[in-house]
């Protein structure tokens, strides 16, 4: 499920996504986005930073590659509150480190998620990303 629906910003070291929580989301329980949903949102936001390097820069449809990413470790996570259906969350990712070889990219990315100005999630994730 797409958990980062609108991306107003992306460069080589950072990204930002917006996601409006709908009651049809598989991660909604009792009217709230679950912890798992918040982690998936952070992962999708963060993976775009490194994942973009697998695509042709002129490919605006995203069809030039078949990228797969995995969370290899959750180094730290602090969830301050769960957002409710109807809330729009804004998630920022910042690349901390990256290692590339012929088979995959490994990276560490920090993420923060907000509702308006209120911080609701702060985490640091490790990823393995490769072309499938």
Image: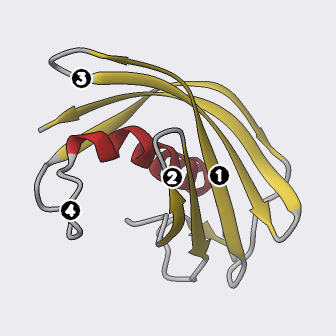
**Which quadrant does the N terminus fall into?**
bottom left
Q: Which mark is residue 92?
A: 1
The mark nearer the N terminus, 2 or 1, is 2
The mark nearer the N terminus, 1 or 4, is 4
Residue ID at (75%, 41%): 122
Q: Please give left or right for residue 132 compared with residue 92 in the image.
A: left
* Residue 13 horizontal/vertical position (percent): 53, 38
The mark nearer the N terminus, 4 or 2, is 2
- Front-lying residue, 50 or 116: 50
Given contact means CB atoms under 8 Å apart, are the residues at marks 2 and 1 in contact? yes
The mark nearer the N terminus, 4 or 3, is 4
Q: Secondary structure at mark 1?
A: strand
Q: Which mark is residue 84?
A: none
Whether 103 is drawn above or below 78: the answer is above
Front of the two marks 4 and 2: 4
Residue that badge 2 annotates: 45
- Front-lying residue, 113 or 58: 58
């Amino acid at each position: 499920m797409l958990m980062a629906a609108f991306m107003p910003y992306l460069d080589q070291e950072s990204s930002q996504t917006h996601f409006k929580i709908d009651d049809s989301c598989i991660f909604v329980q009792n009217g709230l986005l679950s912890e798992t949903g918040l982690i998936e949102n952070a992962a999708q936001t963060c993976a775009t930073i490194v994942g973009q390097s697998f695509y042709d820069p002129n490919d605006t449809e995203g069809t030039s590659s078949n990228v797969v990413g995995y969370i290899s470790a959750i180094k730290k996570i602090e969830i301050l509150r769960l957002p409710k259906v109807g809330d729009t969350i804004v998630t920022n990712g910042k690349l901390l480190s990256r290692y590339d070889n012929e088979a995959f990219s490994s990276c560490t990315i920090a993420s923060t998620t907000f509702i308006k100005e209120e911080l609701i999630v702060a985490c640091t994730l490790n990823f393995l990303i490769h072309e499938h």
